[in-house]
Amino acid sequence: MKISKGAFYSLLIISLTSFVLIGILAFAVSHFNEIYDRLYNMYNDLNNRFSDINASLDSVNNSIDSFENSIDSFENSIDNGGDNQGSGEKTVYILKEYNGIIGVFDERGNLMKTINTAVSSLSAQDREQLTHGIITTSNEELAGLIEDLS
């Protein structure tokens, strides 16, 4: 069987076109896997970052709750007269970070004493509370706070 030149060239073009299309398809498949892997890794990275953000938000919410509890405790203490009810004066103590350690301040912000405990050695929640200041009007509560933080 003999084929004409035109038919031969047509078959040759169809064969070459098939090889080119197969090559393009193989290239696309190999790059699809690479792109899929990159997208999957980016998704996991974003998911981890959102988890970190959620953990940070939980920590902030806990700090806000703790701060609000400190304010409520302080207000209740004022309503109940504080330690010095008989004298008419209320002593306010504020524990805050002072040069990397714990400082005890009066209501005017005057440093009364320092506690030689490195703030960096405390839990994140305690550090956050000390950043805002822990307020008390009770000598007993002040002693308890100092003991807990030491």
Image (cartoon, rainbow, N blue to C red):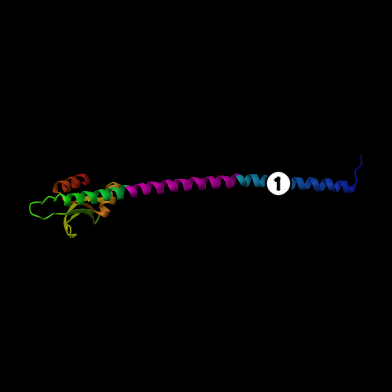
Q: Position of residue 4 (x, y in %)?
A: 91, 46
Residues 93 and 33: in front is 93
Q: Check if residue 53 falls in the magenta segment.
A: yes
In the rendered image, the residue lying farthest to the front is 79
Residues 77 and 57: in front is 77
Q: Position of residue 19 (x, y in %)?
A: 75, 45
Residues 20 and 91: in front is 91
Q: Residue at x 46, y 46 (%)?
A: 47
Please indicate whether residue 23 sits to the left or right of residue 147 in the image.
Answer: right
Please indicate whether residue 129 sits to the left or right of residue 143 in the image.
Answer: right
In magenta, the rendered stretch is: 33-61
Q: Secondary structure at mark 1?
A: helix
* Quarter of the image that includes the N terminus: top right
What secondary structure predominates along the stretch shown in magenta? Answer: helix
| Amino acid at circle 1 | Gly
Please indicate whether residue 108 sits to the left or right of residue 27 in the image.
Answer: left
Q: Residue at x 38, y 46 (%)?
A: 55
Count of numbered marks:
1
Residues 85 and 121: in front is 85
In the rendered image, the residue lying farthest to the top is 1
Q: Position of residue 12 (x, y in %)?
A: 82, 47
Q: Few, some or many C-alpha atoms within 10 Å of disc 1 (few <14, some 14-19, many ≥20)?
A: few
In the rendered image, the residue lying farthest to the right is 2
Q: Check if residue 46 falls in the magenta segment.
A: yes
Say which residue label 1 marks: 23
Q: Position of residue 74 (x, y in %)?
A: 20, 51
